[in-house]
Amino acid sequence: MGAGQSSQALDPSGTPPSTALHVLRVTPDSPASKTSIEPLFDFVVGFEDESLTSTIDVAVLERIVEGHEGRTLNLLVWNAKNRETRVVQIVPSRKWSLPSGPSSPDAQPSLLGLSMRMCEPEVALDTVWHVLDVLEGSPAESAGLVPYGDYITGWSGGVLSSENDFYDLVEAHIDKPLQVYVYSHDFDALREVVLVPNRHWGGEGLLGCVFGYGLLHRIPPQPADRIAGASTPPELHEPDDEFEEQELFVPADVHYPQPRLPMNLQRQEEDWHSTQVDTIQEEDLTQRCFFIPACVNRQSHTCILITQQSPKSQSFGYS
């Protein structure tokens, strides 16, 4: 099993641990980025040979990680979406973050590339702000927030622990960029969004957005048949066989047989064509010509265009 692979669930009961290290961010190109560790929803609850029910000790975990530098370490990770604990293999290393130039001898680059905090997993995801409405032309619309599907989970400067923390943060960033983390339930993906709160966008509020907070606005679980991290919801995928016989473009040289008409309709159609041919032969050719080829002498062929007007006000045009 490679460094980025995970084993099957270890705790099928789905009971969350009492305390754990909440993964807030995974640094790109770090050892953690090469694993299945997922920000926001993953919690480190222990390491190999440790009981799942024991309280994780940060100091002990730090020593274990340092002792496994350059070697595979099995982390026990609990996921809040499927409520299962799995084993994630990771190889702690400092090489990925070492600068190319000379550095301070006291510098201690991260071994895992994880930003974590100690918390209770059972209530860690309660502090989210559900986007309910986005006004047209507002800063929230400019940032790409999606009503009902998006949840603000935190910001780049730290953790938000109460409802008013986010509103205070917005007021502190008037006319300044505010980087927040937004989870999309529709696409099962976490992204960074930059908001610029202001009062001169032409509407009410600093963001022009309505939020929901509390028990009714927690992040709902994903459907059991949903592929984790899928970029397109399954309802957008349609069976291919429904469109196999529908052609958008038909080659010009393709001939499709004409449908056969009943005998009585065929006789009516033949009589109609015969009448039209006799009428055309009796008409003046000069009044049947609408377009003249460029090589034709205009003095010998005149086109007359008659508009749909009364006989007294007929207009004639010559080409």
Image (cartoon, rainbow, N blue to C red):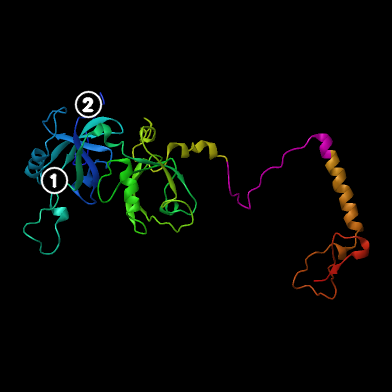
Residue at left 6%, top 43%?
Answer: 67
Q: Is residue 22 visible?
A: yes
Asked which quadrant contains residue 47, the reply is: top left
Q: Which residue is mark 2?
A: 11
Q: Secondary structure at mark 1?
A: loop
Q: Of 66 and 69, which appears nearest the observer?
A: 66
Q: Is residue 68 left or right of residue 201?
A: left
Q: Position of residue 108 (x, y in %)?
A: 10, 53
Q: Position of residue 45 (x, y in %)?
A: 18, 34
Looking at the rendering, the stretch of residues picked out in magenta corresponds to: 246-266
Near mark 1 (Cα within 10 A), the count class, few <14, some 14-19 or many ≥20, is many
Q: Which residue is mark 1?
A: 92
Residue at left 37%, top 59%?
Answer: 175
Q: Position of residue 64 (x, y in %)?
A: 8, 40
Type of the residue with mark 1: Pro
Asked which quadrant contains residue 218, the reply is: top left
